[in-house]
Every structure is written in C-alpha cells, then in structure tokens.
Amino acid sequence: MMLILPDNRFNHQAGSEITPAHVYARRREFLQQMAAAGWMAGAGASMAQSPVTRPGKLAPLNATVSTLAGAQASDALTPYKNASTYNNFYEFGTDKSDPADNAHTLKTRPWGIEIEGLVKKLGRLNLEDLLKLSPMEERIYRLRCVEGWSMVIPWVGYSLSELIKRAEPLGSAKYVEFITLADPKTMPYVGSRILSWPYTEGLRMDEAMHSLSLLTFGMYGEVLPNQNGAPVRLTVPWKYGFKSAKSIVKIRFTENQPATAWNKAAAHEYGFYSNVNPNVDHPRWSQASERRIGDGGILTKKVKTLMFNGYEAQVGQLYAGMDLAKNF
Ligand SMILES: Nc1nc2c(c(=O)[nH]1)N[C@H]1C(S)=C(S)[C@@H](COP(=O)(O)O)O[C@H]1N2
Ligand SMILES: [Mo]
C-alpha cells in the first residue's frame, strides 16, 4: 500500500513559507516555557498563538497552543505538503492523491451540523456559531491509518465535549454517531459501491467526551483544506484514522451502538472500537509498526506502533477490563 512519495525537500511550492518542523518545535517549546514561567499572563497571552505561517495559503485560523496532557506530541511534524496530498477521503476517490485532486468541488459554505437524537437541545448549529462555540486550540496529534502510515499534524479545534455539553444529552444517550456529507453532485464517488454512503462513524459517549477527542476546523494555523475534511471533522488520535470522520453534517445521540461505514463494509476487519493496538493484527496484515509519511516515501524506516497510538496514559482507563482482541 505504500507509494513512493515525492521528495519534499525539493518540491515545496512555497518553501520559504513553510516552517521546518524542528524550527516549529523549538518555537513551541519556547512559547510553552514562557507560558509556564508566567510571562504570558494578561496581554501577553496572545503570544501563545500558533507560529505556523499559512503553508497552504488558506484562511488563517488562530488558536492558542493547547496545554492539555497528550496534546503536544513531540514528534517531527509531517510537512504540510504531505499532510494535504496523501489522504483517504473515499467520496473523492480511492487513490491517496485523489482527494487533493478532486475535493475542490466540495462546497463548504453554507455549512451546519444538525444535532439529533437523545438530547435536550436539538437543531442545527451553523458553522459560524460552531467556530465561536469554544476557544480554538492547536494540538499536535499523531494520526495512524489502519494501512500502516501515520502523520503528525498541528490540528486546530476544540474538544468535542464542548459541543456535546451544549447539546445536553439525556441519560439514555450512550453513543454518538457522526454522519458526513454525501452529495453526489460534488463528490464523484458517492454512489459508487466501495462503501455505503453517507460515511458514518461512532464513539461511545465516554470516548466522545474525552478531552482529547477534537472537533477539528483547521490544521497548520489555517482552515482545513477540503481534502482533509473541511469545514469540520473529527480527530480521535488513539484510534485508527478512519474513526476521524470528515466533513460532518449531523451528530446523533443514540442508545444503541451505531453502525459505522467500515464495519458495514467488512465487519471481520474493522470493529467498532478500532483503537490503535500493535498487539491485535488486522486479518490481512500486522499492526505492529508504521511509517511516517514525509520526505522518505517507501524508504522511510518503520517505527514501532504504540498502544493506543501513544495515548495510553490518557485513554487506557476507558477500556479497563475489556478484552481488546474481541473488541477490536
Ligand atoms: N467522510 C470521510 N471521512 C474519512 C474518510 C473517508 O473516506 N470519508 N477516511 C478516513 C481515513 S481511512 C483516514 S486515515 C483519515 C485521513 O485523514 P487525513 O486525510 O486528514 O490524514 O480520514 C478518515 N475520515
Ligand atoms: Mo485510514
């Protein structure tokens, strides 16, 4: 499944605009030290904003550097070019380059999320209101695809729990279902038989309420490129990438475990939980290691995959006592 990727050291379209990952990491460290030392109280607080300088030339989305435990992976960032051209978004095709080539047709305005099911506050929240619902944070998360590639991306958004709290779920709500856009006019593969549309995903309520579950509006200091799930997606860093539903239009609160797109397509290969787990193989391949997408392509050395993608300290408790081989 690994394709040979272009060597990014030589083909950045706007190389001078791109902050190299190590420079970025050092600035971030500096900002965090400043914050920790109390230098950024009061008026100085705005200094904690993302140091990235619009690598995709999309609208900027300002955010403060998140101080949440687990939200600042220290791994080298994936170059923006790779993160925005090597994607899975089957509504736009199945090749990794298809979403970047085809997703320009996606209409991201007007947009809204419909809140449905077992909640007190039903109805539609439009994007403008969603953007103002809670302060934007920048969080560096690893995201690992089930196929064995991974990326490290500075995402911009806020905890999904902020939105859930506003919806006031009823006691009977045990799961959250995410329904994404399925518009055959703008998404060429909706209607094809690869998956059943719309692409849907789901989380257990406690997973959805975990502060690391990010309702995501941007990356690298800008709004999301269409191919990464504009204008709003999920990022659940301890689960395989397919749980991070893109271009969400509906969130439904349910009593029963919702169906999910990949579980419907191949139940023996993709379970509901889909937590990153190096000890439980996919029926057709090992899940013990991964390759970071970046400059090296197929030559990039594999690294060991970590339990819960490295977020075990934060999320392990959610699965205490569960047989993770059965609940894969
Ligand atoms: N609507 C929708 N969301 C989706 C997908 C998809 O095909 N359709 N693919 C998933 C998969 S398999 C992965 S790995 C991630 C990829 O996110 P990225 O392209 O931002 O890295 O998006 C997920 N969300
Ligand atoms: Mo994936």
Image: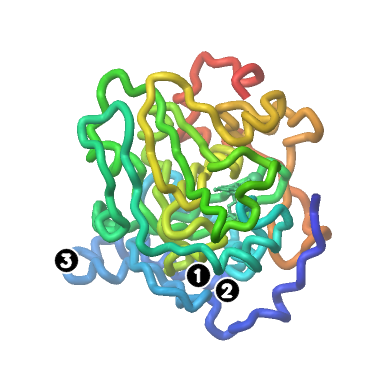
Q: Earlier in the sequence, mark 2 or mark 3?
A: 2
Q: Quadrant of residue 185?
A: bottom right
Which quadrant would residue 32 be assigned to in this image?
Answer: bottom left
Q: Are marks 3 and 1 in contact (CB under 8 Å)?
A: no
The residue singled out by tag 1 in the image is 24
Task: Tell me which residue sits at (48%, 78%) in the image.
Answer: 57
Q: Is residue 131 left or right of residue 267?
A: left
> In the image, is 88 to the left or to the right of 296?
left
Which residue lies at the image location 37% right of the left edge and 40% below the top edge? 211
Kind of residue sitting beneath label 3: Gly
Q: Position of residue 280 (x, y in %)?
A: 70, 27
Q: Amino acid at mark 1?
A: Tyr
Residue contact between numbered discs 2 and 1, judged by CB atoms under 8 Å: yes
Residue indicated by mark 3: 42
Where the C terminus falls, by quadrant? top right
- Element carrying mark 1: helix
Q: Which residue is mark 2?
A: 20
Sequence order check, earlier mark of 3 and 1: 1
Distance of mark 3 from mark 1, alpha carbons? 24 Å
Q: Nearer the viewer, residue 110 or 145?
A: 110
Depth order, front residue of 57/179: 179
Q: Measured from the top left, where is residue 252 in percent x and y?
A: 37, 34
The residue drawn where x is 56% and y is 54% is 184
The x and y percentages for residue 292 are 69, 55
Residue farthest to the left, as pictured: 42
Please, is residue 88 above or below residue 268 in the view? Answer: below
Q: Is the shortest distance between ligand 1 and the CB of mark 3 under 8 Å?
A: no
